């Protein structure tokens, strides 16, 4: 099955969007988001392209924006962009550059989604991104929910490329001649994600060449387990407590009986 057919199948099976949905596409100019844009364009979807210029790489950032803007113009797709003082925002908030960029872009995407009357925001996270997130969470310490990976649909945010490996995206890009820009910082190993990507996963692939697919399948199973546990906990909470005056009150005797012990 081609990447395009997989894209359509994954979107349909996960009910990511309807035919009449207008979708805001977050397009950085990198290979993942440009392939996502190409797929949506090929499918004839009602889309709006949104680009964030974080002003972190000088003229390189401006060239990213120019690529996306030109691609949208050639294909007659509505385009909107915004520039941010990401470094200043990070310093003001006392957070990392990565966290600052995330906050700035998602706040802006939500604003533009409302202005352009879009139902959804599409981001181009792929299967490898999902695995990297899982391994980062595992390394830092996490509960079950931190091992379930990213969801195809989270509120108004959809991830229609979550099924695709980076290798499959690169192959599609070559086959279809999709233009893109390379962010050289992706090769630097000073960031945790890049260390996982360039140093850890290659070693794991020596042990299991299909480690990405294996870890992704594990994340899917854990997500199912997490959903079951969450539902079970919600049912228990409803049985053992009641809401009164904006507060939730638990019956300690029932709670002790349920746990099999008494105070």
Image: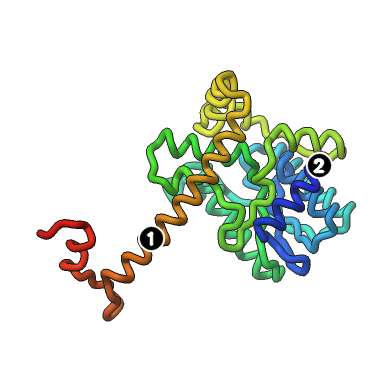
Q: Is residue 231 above or below residue 27?
A: below
Front residue of 163 and 94: 163
Asked which secondary structure carries label 2, the reply is loop
**Residue depicted at x 69% and y 46%:** 161
Residue 120, x across and y down, in percent: 66, 63
- Quadrant housing the C terminus: bottom left
Q: Is residue 261 left or right of residue 104?
A: left
**Residue depicted at x 78% and y 42%:** 3
Q: Nearer the viewer, mark 1 or mark 2?
A: 1
Residue to which mark 1 is pinned: 232
Front residue of 11 and 64: 11
How many numbered discs? 2
Hey, which residue is sitting farthest left in the picture?
263
**Residue depicted at x 32% and y 65%:** 236
Front residue of 229 and 183: 229
Real-space CA distance between mark 1 and mark 2, rounded to the nearest whole angstrom: 39 Å
**Number of residues whose C-alpha sits closer than 10 Å to that of mark 1, classed few (under 14), some (14–19) or many (20 or more):** few
Residue to which mark 2 is pinned: 2
- Quadrant housing the N terminus: top right
Determine which quarter of the picture holds residue 205. Answer: top right
Hey, which residue is sitting farthest right in the picture?
74
Q: Is residue 223 above or below residue 215?
A: below
Hey, which residue is sitting farthest bottom in the picture?
245
Residue 222, x across and y down, in percent: 48, 45
**Residue depicted at x 69% and y 41%:** 164
Residue 51, x across and y down, in percent: 70, 52
Residue 237, x across and y down, in percent: 31, 66
Label 1 close to label 2 by CB (< 8 Å): no
Asked which secondary structure carries label 1, the reply is helix
The earlier-in-sequence mark between 1 and 2 is 2
Q: Is residue 175 left or right of residue 221?
A: right
């Amino acid at each position: 099955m081609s990447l395009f057919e997989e894209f359509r199948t994954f979107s349909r099976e996960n009910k990511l969007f309807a035919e009449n949905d207008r979708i805001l596409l977050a397009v950085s100019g990198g290979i993942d988001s440009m392939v996502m844009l190409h797929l949506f364009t090929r499918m004839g979807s009602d889309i709006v392209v949104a680009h964030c210029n974080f002003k972190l790489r000088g003229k390189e950032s401006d060239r990213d924006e120019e690529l996306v803007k030109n691609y949208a113009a050639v294909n007659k797709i509505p385009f909107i962009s915004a520039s941010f003082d990401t470094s200043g925002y990070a310093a003001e908030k006392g957070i990392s550059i990565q966290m600052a960029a995330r906050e700035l872009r998602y706040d802006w995407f939500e604003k533009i989604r409302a202005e352009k009357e879009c139902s959804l925001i599409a981001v181009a996270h792929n299967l490898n991104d999902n695995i990297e997130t899982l391994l980062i969470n595992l390394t830092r310490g996490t509960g079950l929910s931190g091992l379930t990976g990213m969801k195809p649909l989270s509120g108004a945010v959809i991830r229609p490329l979550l099924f695709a490996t980076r290798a499959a995206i690169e192959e599609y890009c070559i086959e279809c001649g999709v233009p893109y820009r390379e962010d050289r910082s992706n090769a630097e190993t000073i960031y945790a994600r890049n260390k996982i990507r360039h140093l850890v996963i290659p070693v794991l692939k020596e042990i299991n060449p299909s480690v990405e697919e294996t870890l992704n399948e594990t994340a899917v199973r854990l997500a199912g387990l997490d959903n079951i546990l969450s539902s079970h906990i919600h049912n228990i909470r409803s049985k053992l407590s009641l809401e009164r005056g904006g507060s939730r009150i638990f019956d300690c005797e029932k709670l002790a009986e349920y746990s099999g012990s008494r105070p």
